[in-house]
Image (cartoon, helix red, strand yellow):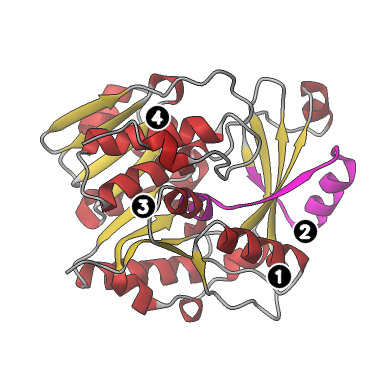
Amino acid sequence: MTKPLDVLAIGNAIVDVIATADDAFLAAQSLDKGSMRLIDAAEAERLYGVMGPGREVSGGSGANAAAGIAALGGQVAFIGRVADDQLGQVFAHDIRAAGVDYLTPFANSGNPTARCLILVTPDAQRTMNTFLGASQDLTEADVDYELVRQAGITYLEGYLWDPPAPRAAMAKALKVAREAGNRVAFTLSDAFCVERHRDDFLMLADGNVDVLFANEVEIKSLYQTDDFDTAIAAIQGKLPIAVVTRSEKGALVVTPDGTIAVPAEPVSKIVDTTGAGDLFAAGFLAGLSQARPLADCARLGAIAAAEVISHYGARPEADLKALAAKVTG
């Protein structure tokens, strides 16, 4: 039976505030270039006050992937919690305008909507300072598990594994999806997530999800090795599909039967790497939902990632369907 929903993504609902900065500013603020750190409301207010003019763009890893899937023509929904405040309204408007079904009710109490203050240096590296706000308050009551049953693929975001309530909500979604005979995809999100939740993530990677997304740093952290080939050997055969992105080296699709290397898509100028992994996942999942060969799925991911790093912000701006038309299979 054809599922009415190709992909359901569950993750943090965040509004990104993106500003340019130089290395001297990062040093003055004691920020480690290229890192992602969690901050509280007071630090979010302080840093926002000293950073340069910002551009507000709705973000969040799973939400970015959902927007990419919609841009590729997929039927996609997103679940994530925002407050009934200005940024919450911005987030809801943006994701719906991107063609994503978003029906999670606004929270009328508790934390304000999450925001990520992103400082982009001239070398296109992004330093992220994230206040998780309302997104970390997601509970099982916020999740429409009927959508989980309807979705061919449920995509879960590792960034949301930290707080107990969202973790329980996603664990239930995983169980519901698998009982319905649907696929589950999971992204490790960041090495700091792996460090905090290695045992859980190893359990998920050991056949408890169908697709695992990671970058080179994350997969090596998961298996506590400095050698990429050792990490790949460790995960091979554990689950149907692992997808490991390697920036300019492209990506590697790992299956029990072997590996498929796919080159990165050429980019004339890298402007901002925010969202590259999210859009790679979007392209891959869009292809997977269409039953394309795995090599084509990875090529779609590479094309979507190349588009998003060519401009500021983590949501696609070009016609992804037109760019993806070059992939046949």
Whole-number angstrom distance, CA of label 3 to CA of label 4: 16 Å
Residue 41 numbered tag: 2
Whole-number angstrom distance, CA of label 4 to CA of label 2: 32 Å
Q: Which residues are magenta?
A: 37-65
Q: Are marks 2 and 1 in contact (CB under 8 Å)?
A: yes
The residue type indicated by label 1 comes to Asn
Q: Which residue is mark 1?
A: 111
Horizontal side, residue 63 vs residue 134: left or right: left
Residue 231 appears anywhere in the view: yes
The extreme left residue here reads 257
Residue situated in front as seen by the camera: 292 or 215: 292
Query: Can you give x and y, in whole percent of width and height, for residue 11 in the image?
Result: 50, 60
Q: Which residue is mark 3?
A: 186
Mark 1 or mark 3, earlier in chain: 1
Horizontal side, residue 250 vs residue 319: left or right: left
Question: Element under label 1?
Answer: loop
